[in-house]
Amino acid sequence: MLVNKRVIADSGFWMALYDPKDQYHLEAYTLPVDLDSASLLIPWPSLYETLNTYFVKDPRRVTAFRLVLGKSNVHLVDDLPYRDDAYASVTSGRSARPLSLVDQIIRLILADSAWRVGAIVTFNKVDFIDVCRRRAIEIVPT
């Protein structure tokens, strides 16, 4: 159970958790993430990606997500310190593989030792595995 770690939750986790039609819904629902006690880090770009038109069409999803976001253990991470580098990485072709701007922001946060991230919850392991290995950050699910 991810309790005493700082955990970044990727957008895909939130979408899967609240959408019963999502291919990862059951897995998201049963992951060892305690939304009440883990220190959850949610980068602002993940909010933009999660709260898309499809997601907000169902008020139950929005309400459930809003309740999580309002908890004292949830921290919204400002992306301003990472924007320029992430944008440059996406548009310059420096990356070994194409990644979204949101994923680049998350990668930079994971690489930033100031955040002391212990785990990332994502269904896109391959997008983060290199930075997680370097920083000994757990990927959930494994």
Image (tube, grey):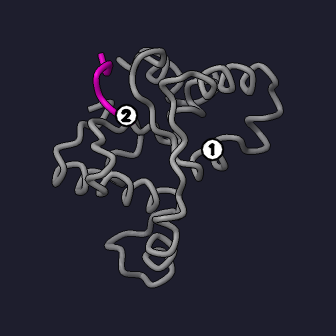
Quick check: 85 above or below 79?
below
Question: Is 127 part of what is drawn in magenta?
Answer: no
Question: Is 2 part of what is drawn in magenta?
Answer: yes
Distance from Cα at disc 2 to Cα at disc 1: 15 Å
112 left or right of 122 in image = left
Quick check: 97 above or below 57?
below
Q: How many marks?
A: 2
Residue in view at x 24 percent, y 36 percent: 138
In primary-sequence order, the first of circles 2 and 1 is 2
88 left or right of 133 in image = right
Position of the C terminus, as image quadrant, is top left
Query: Residue 118: x, y in percent?
Result: 26, 36
Type of amino acid under label 1: Leu
Tag 2 and tag 1, C-beta contact below 8 Å: no
Tag 2: Cα neighbours inside 10 Å, few (<14), some, or many (≥20)? many
Residue identified by numbered label 1: 47
Residue identified by numbered label 2: 7
In the image, 61 versus 54, the foreground residue is 61
Type of amino acid under label 2: Val
Q: Which residues are magenta?
A: 1-7
Quick check: 107 above or below 96?
above
Quick check: 95 above or below 41?
below
44 left or right of 32 in image = right
Query: Residue 70: x, y in percent?
Result: 63, 25
71 left or right of 111 in image = right
Query: Residue 37: x, y in percent?
Result: 41, 16
Q: Of helix, strand and loop, which one carries label 2?
A: strand
Residue in view at x 33 percent, y 51 percent: 110
Secondary structure, magenta segment, majority class? loop
Q: Of helix, strand and loop, which one carries label 1?
A: helix
Residue in view at x 68 percent, y 19 percent: 64
